[in-house]
Image (spheres, coloured by chain):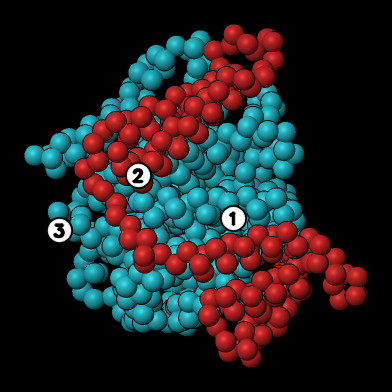
Chain colours: A cyan, B red
Amino acid sequence: MIEGILIGLSTALSLTNILMVMVGCFAGTIIGMLPGLGPMTAIALMIPITYGFDPSTGLILMAGVYYGAVFGGSTSSILLNAPGIPGTVATAFDGYPMAQQGKAGKALAIAAYSSFAGGTISAIFLLVAAPSLSKVSLAFRSPDYFALMILGLTAISAFSSKGQFLKAMMMVVLGLMLATVGQDSLSDITRFTFNNMNLTDGISFVLIVMATFAMSEALTIIFRGKDPNRAAKQISLTELGSIKVNKEETIKMAKTIPRSSILGFLIGVLPGAGATIASFLAYGMERNYVNEEEKQKFGKGSVHGLSAPETANNAACSGSFVPLLTLGIPGSGTTAVMLGALLGFGIQPGPRLYQTNPEIFWSVIMSMYIGMVVLLILNLPLIPYIARILAVPRNYLIPLILFFSVTGIYLMSFNNFDIFLMIGIAVVATFLRLYDFPMPPLILAFVLGGLMEETLRRSLLISDGSPNFLWDRPITLIILLITITIVGWQIFSTFRKKS
Amino acid sequence: MRISPTKFISLLFLVLSVFYLYTAYNIQVFAFDENAPFNARTFPIYLGWAGIILSSLKIILPEKVTTEVNHKHLDYKSIIYLIIISLIYAAVILKIGYFISTSLFLFASYYFLGERRWGLMFILSFPFVAAFMYLLHGLLNIYLRDPFLKYIGVMG
């Protein structure tokens, strides 16, 4: 293994490759910051450019773009409450309130340190445990995936609802309903399209996330413009704050990072689960770990609440490379794009890659790690400049958020139906947010909807329509029991509050 | 009897769920799939029932945590203007092209939000959109459809 690491390092540390990773990180950050353009788009854009390079250089450039875009996505989540990718939605829960308190620089620094630490720890896991972990992920069957997704949705409802579990569960159902619009994946039967051709392919994730986060946030700021409490918050938006993290915050991060890294990595290894579930579960888990005083700070700018999802989503990014590199199965959308790039270079990932071409395997891992180091060295000092986005007055910021949202959708489809749909959903979301109906459960449900139906379909077909699949396998049963415990805990908490 | 806004939203969600369930039962599936353990209707039917149960519970159960919104503090005028401008923008973007429609949308939004620094408003609309288009189309090679700029020969 040591020999492999050295081969990987010698390739990644050449002058050209270091330059490539720097360019990649910078370009990735810029693209990732634009709401709607996440790592997947950023990497996809780079694929044609990398064809001119040798495989290692191309992969190193893409690794830089990948981590740059993830960092950029966190930046737009924290500064604008506009997550470009589902994996950074949980980052906004505490990152955005922190920015509103005038600690934007600090929030970005905590996100950067947590991402770096999460990525580093999971890269070590990846080096040590890749072959054996792929066996664990192979042991998961459709019923387990289905139960895991139910757990993820219940957890997000429990932890993001501020005590209003039923409202959050209603948003979960709404998200799943929106995900069923369009063609059924197996039979190609169109559902809920009402003979509108524009809905045949379903509603895009970018549209939903733009409408419920970016656009709805912009409308909410305007809507509550006369609110004296909100006006005070707007004034504090112009304070950028320091990027220095004090001792107390460092201790909090040091406690959060190890457990979130382990969770993030393990979730990332499971195909399909990825950074989104990891970040939401880490957020929920962290809230349960901390004391009552810290728990109250969640959703209001908690260091634990920001550090946990940021650590976990980066750890999951590395974890998702395990099934890709050892089995040739992409575990997430981003790794699917990476698979396309590897195939373009004539490299077929899978068990044979690890055994017969270890130099490629190690250079991919090393390039990922060097990308994170460069990002920390390059982007962290730039945080005060990046955070200046907040200093833009409301009269300019709001139209610019709307402009980025509309552009993101227009770029995807060149179709004004999608823009009308986005405006409609944004207006509904604005009113729902006004009455504390949380949007994150809707987003997660929408993302998981297709996969959830697919795993339920397989499970029911295997069990011939019987619900036995929910308790036949020990893993499924354990996940189901955890879900029931969360629901039970919510009911118990409600009764305790009453008494 | 006064119904709280949360319960009213839950009632709307109940109506939506009933309609969704009705539509789900009417999804046309293949004849050989009609009695299969899982077909295109199954998942939506479960969702419809879940929506009905959850919204009914929200309506029936007493509200322990109420969300109070002071409507005097809500700026209905600005938001209505902004939504109308956005709808007009969506309606004309294909006809007059991305550059002009986006620049005009930004300029009008600044104006209706109370901005009167004309020079800054202009810079942050027309030249800003041009620079953004150059970044996307010129540098990142992301295709941006604009029939007007194509017509006058600025874009290929």
Q: Residue at x 45, y 77 (%)?
A: A390
* Type of amino acid at the residue the image marks with label 2: Thr
Q: CA distance from mark 3 to mark 2?
A: 29 Å
Q: Label 2: how many residues lie within 10 Å, few (<14), some (14-19) or many (20+)?
A: many
The subunit letter for the residue under badge 3 reads: A
3D distance between C-alphas at marks 1 and 2: 22 Å
Callout in the foreground (1, 2)? 2
Residue A120 visible within the image: no
| B89 shown above or below B65 | below
A294 on left or right of A319: left
* Disc 2: host chain: B
Question: At which x and y percent is residue B33?
Answer: 64, 13
Residue topped by disc 1: A423
Establish if B34 lies above or below A75.
Answer: above
Q: What amino acid type is highlighted by mark number 3?
A: Glu
Indicate which label's residue lies in the foreground, 3 or 2: 2
- Residue depicted at x 72% and y 33%: A195
Task: Pinpoint residue A481: horizontal percent, then vertical percent.
Answer: 28, 27
Q: Is residue A383 left or right of residue A338?
A: left
Residue A274: x percent and y percent?
A: 47, 45
- The residue shown at (44%, 32%) is B14
Find disc 3 in the rendering and name its residue: A293
Residue B49 seen by the camera: yes
* Residue that extends furthest to the front in the rendered view of this protein: B1
**Residue A58 figure quarter:** bottom right
Mark 1 to mark 3 CA distance (whole Å): 39 Å
**Circle count:** 3
- The residue to which callout 2 is attached is B6
Residue in the image at 41% along x and 64% along y? B74
Q: Please provide percent x and percent y for residue A13.
A: 55, 71
